[in-house]
Amino acid sequence: MTGRATVYDVARVAGVSIKTVSRVVNGSEQVSEPTRQRVLTAVAELAYVRNSIAHSLRTGTGDAIGVVIDSIADSFFAKLVSVIEERMLAEGISVLIASTGRSGTRERGQVTRLAGQNVRALLIAPTGDDHDYIIELTRGLPVVLLDRGWELPGYDTVLVQDRIGAKAATDHLIARGHRRIAFIGDNGDLPTIAERRLGYLDGLAGAAIEVDDALLRTGCGEPEPAAAATAELLALPNPPTAVFSSNPRASLGVVRALHQGLRTDIALISFGDFALADSLEPAVTIVDQDPTPIAEAAVDRLLARMRGEHSEATNIVLPVTVVPRGSGELVPCNRS
Amino acid sequence: MTGRATVYDVARVAGVSIKTVSRVVNGSEQVSEPTRQRVLTAVAELAYVRNSIAHSLRTGTGDAIGVVIDSIADSFFAKLVSVIEERMLAEGISVLIASTGRSGTRERGQVTRLAGQNVRALLIAPTGDDHDYIIELTRGLPVVLLDRGWELPGYDTVLVQDRIGAKAATDHLIARGHRRIAFIGDNGDLPTIAERRLGYLDGLAGAAIEVDDALLRTGCGEPEPAAAATAELLALPNPPTAVFSSNPRASLGVVRALHQGLRTDIALISFGDFALADSLEPAVTIVDQDPTPIAEAAVDRLLARMRGEHSEATNIVLPVTVVPRGSGELVPCNRS
DNA sequence: CTGGCCATTGACAACGCTGTCACGGGCAAG
DNA sequence: CTTGCCCGTGACAGCGTTGTCAATGGCCAG
């Protein structure tokens, strides 16, 4: 008994036709009570579980969605996926994860792969700036762009106020007297980070502070390069008095470097919360980019599309606020 | 053009039979070069992608595996899944995640669901202690039990030295002079935590320290209850001078509570690392339970099984070591 | 010239399921 | 008693793919 039971097995045991088994399993009303009972008994006896591949093939509707993200090891995306999975479980839909490692090529490969699977819809946090391929590959498939991808018209998107939030953080630091504020972030390929950088520049411009390129560090999306960049900033002849870290993973590196360099007197604001940010000394002020409402909104859109809604693409932009905790309220230090 | 192209479409365009298309797509040698070229041209023209549902149904081999874990929001499991997904991508296999929320009932539901999907194998971090259902539901499906589940014979398992590691941590604290050492952990249903608790008790017994039930806190697998439990411990008339936190998520709560209570003079060892553990003040001493080798070993086993290996079930136990960072080397404080 | 062999190709069935339609029987209306 | 309808049920096809097996045709040996 290696394979699983099929409708035929159940039909044989229950003494009915396979169609009747199908009806019972799918809860059709068109079955008499005694028959239903016999079928249910047989189902239990054989531990029958509907083969969802055959079901998908027949009905044409898959029972999984694909989620394309940077990496599931990133706690922001982990939380995002967690909420998505939870919501989808209620719909009986499975979640396939596909990570891009922030490579546009790999992203494309993953989307291609998923499009060939039984996915019924896609949630994508796009990496690169060329997303035309999505249009081509996902014909007839509901797609919601997550966290990024504002610039692709015709698709539902869910974002946060990247530029506004970044400007608010910068303003927050400027209001405490900082004028040498460093920016740590990934390279500008990521639309999100590009927006946050613009917000940072907005803030500086608003206070008529000249941009110092030495304080603008890109290519630091991960903890290690961010830590290295921070260490370099600290070693500058004229180091910054404040740091704006444009994503929580980079912030992990920044925090490590500041603590290792014993420079916790330098102000810090992180775009996006991270574990223990509020237990550090000082606790880290953040721009609150909570994954939960982002995921909820995205799932809402996706379910609506999966149910056949054909309205115009909507662009949801969630508000963010600065959450003061200590590190962002430090005033400029005078060490050097 | 709403649906995707099928072999029939390609066959029509290329002027061959569907079987030949299938042969070309699957790289069979039995096709003449000119025919192959014509087919490939048609494939490119129609952007044909093999329908993997039909493929799965026909071949009986799915192209996804299922991973059943507590929650993807837990960074330990997130890292685990990340490594698994990375490895599976190289095999062209997708990863389906299913979270249990540590509910045995839900775990069972998830395994049932996955067994009905096209999953080709399962990686399960079992929650409860009744795993007989796994045997029943996963007939003929390769299964590797991850991180827990030692007690289910006939299945490959990958664990760490839970009991030994916990004893080492306890010994480490005892060697610094601690005699009132608290234990924070989830309830004993989780085999892992039960083992760690035994290791903790081993340590106490080895030093002839009597167990104080007031210092043994269970039901704290998540940050919030762990923080609450820690706060209660601090309020005891005779509080502990050291804490052994038996999992990293609990440790997040313990750290928060210690910092909020300004009691960072209390020693702490965490079973399992967590982000920023080394940037805190003091840095947190850990028992190193690295998810990466666990995942690698599990994937190795799984791939071997998927390739048809029929050897005896293997039980891999990975070693752990205490990584001193500061918090575990604090000597007993005398405040009360 | 013929038989046999190999290389290439195609017709057909089947994977497990559900949609379509048809069938048989019971019952109310005519 | 017949007609027509509805209810419960089953036979059959087909979703897109691949495995089996047979057919075709070219080529070489006898």
Image (cartoon, coloured by chain):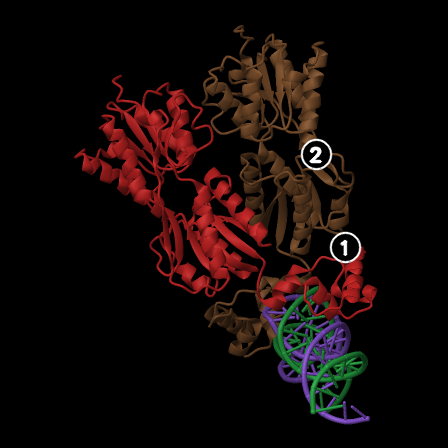
Chain colours: A red, B brown, C green, D purple
User: Looking at the image, is A248 positioned above or below residue B302?
Assistant: above
Residue, disc 1? A47
Expressed as whole percent of the image width and height from the top left, the position of residue A111 reads 48, 56
User: Looking at the image, is B86 positioned above or below residue B5?
Assistant: above
Q: How many residues crowd around disc 2 within 10 Å: few (fewer than 14), some, or many (20 or more)?
A: some
Q: In this view, does B71 lie to the left or right of A282?
A: right
Whether residue A178 is visible, yes or no, is yes
Q: Is residue D23 left or right of residue C8?
A: right
Expressed as whole percent of the image width and height from the top left, the position of residue B46 reads 48, 71
Expressed as whole percent of the image width and height from the top left, the position of residue B184 reads 61, 23
- The residue under the point 40% across, 36% down is A272
The CA distance from mark 2 to mark 1 is 31 Å
User: Looking at the image, is B197 positioned above or below residue A108?
Assistant: above
- The residue under the point 47% across, 27% down is B276
Q: Which sits in the foreground, B98 or B222?
A: B222
Position of the C terminus of chain A, as image quadrant, is: top left
Position of the N terminus of chain A, as image quadrant, is: bottom right
- The residue under the point 24% across, 24% down is A238
Whether residue B28 is visible, yes or no, is no
The amino acid on which the numbered mark 1 sits, given as a three-letter code, is: Ala
Q: Which sits in the foreground, A74 or A14?
A: A14
Task: Determine the residue located farthest toward the left in the rendered image.
Answer: A208
Q: Is residue A329 left or right of residue B113?
A: left
The chain containing the residue under callout 1 comes to A
Residue, disc 2? B316
Indicate the secondary structure of the residue bearing disc 2: strand
